[in-house]
Image (tube, rainbow, N blue to C red):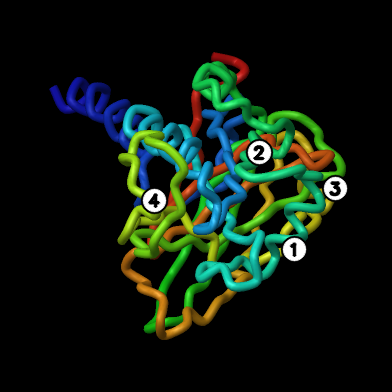
Amino acid sequence: MKKLILIFILPIILFSCEGDDDGITIANDDFVGDYKTNVLVEDLTGTWCGYCPRPAFKLAELKKTNSQLIVVASHGGRDWEPMLNPKHNDLATAFQISGYPYVQLNRKDKWNEQISKITELTPISSKIGLAIESSLSERTLSVNIKAKFSEDFVGLKYVIYVLENDLIYDQANYADFGYGADNPIVGFKHDHVLRKTLTAILGDAVPTEASKKGEYFDTKLLHTYTIPDDYNKDKMEIVAFIIKDNKVINARHSEFGTTQALEKIAGLND
């Protein structure tokens, strides 16, 4: 009877070690396969931009039903912009923007504001799994990212953003794009506002030897950030993504103080 009990219990124990939710410590396992794809949208915007609420509303509505959408709002375009991203002009130059609003999809194409252009990307699996680990000591944030590769890659870079939510500033508004027709919209709530880039905004290099099939890339808590006193650390989040040839391959977002697992879909031998 004891042998039978061990036979039934062992598979349960082995299965329970596999996790895909926040709070699971990442281990160097032998998994080689496909990972969930998350879509990065970088919204170049400003409180002065009267047409910018139009894409903002569409993205906010889509995020309610699509957990694979990651939105970053980079504010700029005017020196007096209250949520100015100091690196905004670098993004604007890299994206070769011609006017506002300008929304970049996976750093590949300008988004035409068609929802299908985002949703058609989410079912596509990725050969790179990505996870974020962070800790917060008083106002010092430490961030680590880990990535695993299911094929050989060269020339990869990674980017880490720190965002803040629930920022209240009046917003110029030229029509009813979903938030009403008031101009300005008084007390508008701005989310996913880019506050700090912990890497070069166009990416830090992933060593080629760390991006081979089956390998892990681990930044080992290299990146730290002292959060300014006027930022609300309880309403902040982290976004990280891997790029190749200036195009996003995969992305993740995370609250502070969590350890994520890689978002595995299926192994190549399954």
Measured in 3D between alpha carbons, the distance from the residue under mark 4 to the one under mark 1, in whole angstroms, is 36 Å
| Mark 1: secondary structure | loop
Measured in 3D between alpha carbons, the distance from the residue under mark 4 to the one under mark 3, in whole angstroms, is 51 Å
Q: Count neighbours of disc 2 (C-alpha within 10 A) and say few if under 14, some if 14 to 19, many if 20 or more.
A: some
Who is closer to the viewer here, 199 or 163?
163
| Mark 4: secondary structure | loop
Please give the name of the residue rendered at 47% of the width and 64% of the height, measured from the top-left corner.
Answer: 134
Measured in 3D between alpha carbons, the distance from the residue under mark 4 to the one under mark 2, in whole angstroms, is 26 Å
Q: Quadrant of residue 112?
A: top right
Q: Which residue is mark 2?
A: 104
Counting from the top left corner in percent of width and height, residue 265 is at: 50, 24
Counting from the top left corner in percent of width and height, residue 240 is at: 58, 51
Q: Earlier in the sequence, mark 2 or mark 3?
A: 2
Measured in 3D between alpha carbons, the distance from the residue under mark 2 to the one under mark 3, in whole angstroms, is 27 Å
Please give the name of the residue rendered at 57% of the width and 51% of the height, measured from the top-left corner.
Answer: 45
The disc labelled 1 sits on which kind of residue?
Ala
Q: Which residue is mark 4?
A: 183
261 lies above or below 220: above
The disc labelled 2 sits on which kind of residue?
Gln
Q: Quadrant of the N terminus?
A: top left
165 lies above or below 110: below
Q: Which mark is residue 208?
A: 3
Q: Which mark is residue 200?
A: 1
